[in-house]
Amino acid sequence: MTIPNYREQIKIVFFDIDETLLVKDKDYLPETTVSAIQKLKANGIIPAIATGRTPSNFPPKIKQLIQQTQMDLFVTMNGQYVSYQGTTLERNPLSKQKIQQLANFFTQHQIEYAQISPTDTCVSAITDKVRSALDPLKGYYYVNKDYFKQHDVFQILAFYDQPEDELVNRSGVLKGLQAVRWHEHSVDLFDEHISKASGIATAIQHLGFTMQNVMAFGDGLNDIEMLTMAGVGVAMGNAHQQVKVAADHVTLHIEEEGIYSFLKAARLID
């Protein structure tokens, strides 16, 4: 596939974290990715992150990347929290009533859950299933079922397997929420009207750009809307098949320097 010259069109590039910037299980971030982001900045193109993660659970290598490249625009928790140069552009916490409803349902059905804020990840209990999903993220979490009563919570992680999808979906407890599976044992739950794409829209409006000026890289199901809405959506070679179908382009696998090779082919870096 021929990749057009996007140098004049693209003003900002958003990157997902897990399996796009970072191979989570191997804790591997290609050196060429660091170089690519530095070259983007040198060419006047803004690099940014769009992730399902909370800022407090960015892995060490991503924090190092941010420091090395001085990235300062973040769409986090699937668009629920957007910040630029340390200033909050958008925040969309879930209602305490909704969280209580979820907590009651999950407790009834012996499903553990996590409450996510920009500063904390609080779980209802620590089990093998919770560890399996959260430990590879290399972030800190602790037990506090009542965290939402004193703090704003922007996203819920529910720890149940795919066979339980029907039980949860049919219960009606997810009304008003979007559920996106990101792990065999866990699902992201967040406001159905908000996503990485809407978070990006907030960011580019602040910066004076349009979606046509945006390029986005992703691999997971929660990236589909972002890749569809962006002027140029790029799926990683290791992406879910549905993500590849939704994207404008498919680049190489993350471990084959997919980000660097595509940015170079698109003439965004030299």
Image: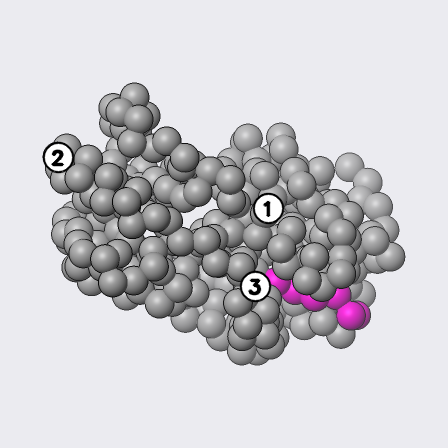
Find numbered disc 3 in the image and state the secondary structure of the residue it sits on.
strand
**Residue 166 visible in image:** no
x 47%, y 72%: residue: 63
Quick one: quadrant of the N terminus? Answer: top right
- Mark 3 — residue? 89
For residue 44: magenta? yes
x 68%, y 62%: residue: 206
Nearest to the eye among marks 2 and 3: give it. 3
Q: Amino acid at mark 2?
A: Gln
Nearest to the eye among marks 3 and 1: give it. 3
Please state the extent of the stretch shown in magenta in the rendering. 43-48
Q: Which sits earlier in the primary sequence, circle 1 or circle 2?
A: 2
Question: In this figure, which colouring scheme has been used for the structure?
Answer: one colour
- Mark 1 — residue? 197
x 78%, y 70%: residue: 44
For residue 34: magenta? no
Question: What is the quadrant of residue 257 in the picture?
Answer: bottom right
Question: What is the quadrant of residue 204 in the picture?
Answer: bottom right
Q: In the rendering, at what x and y percent does residue 28 appear?
A: 46, 61
Q: Are marks 3 and 1 in contact (CB under 8 Å)?
A: no
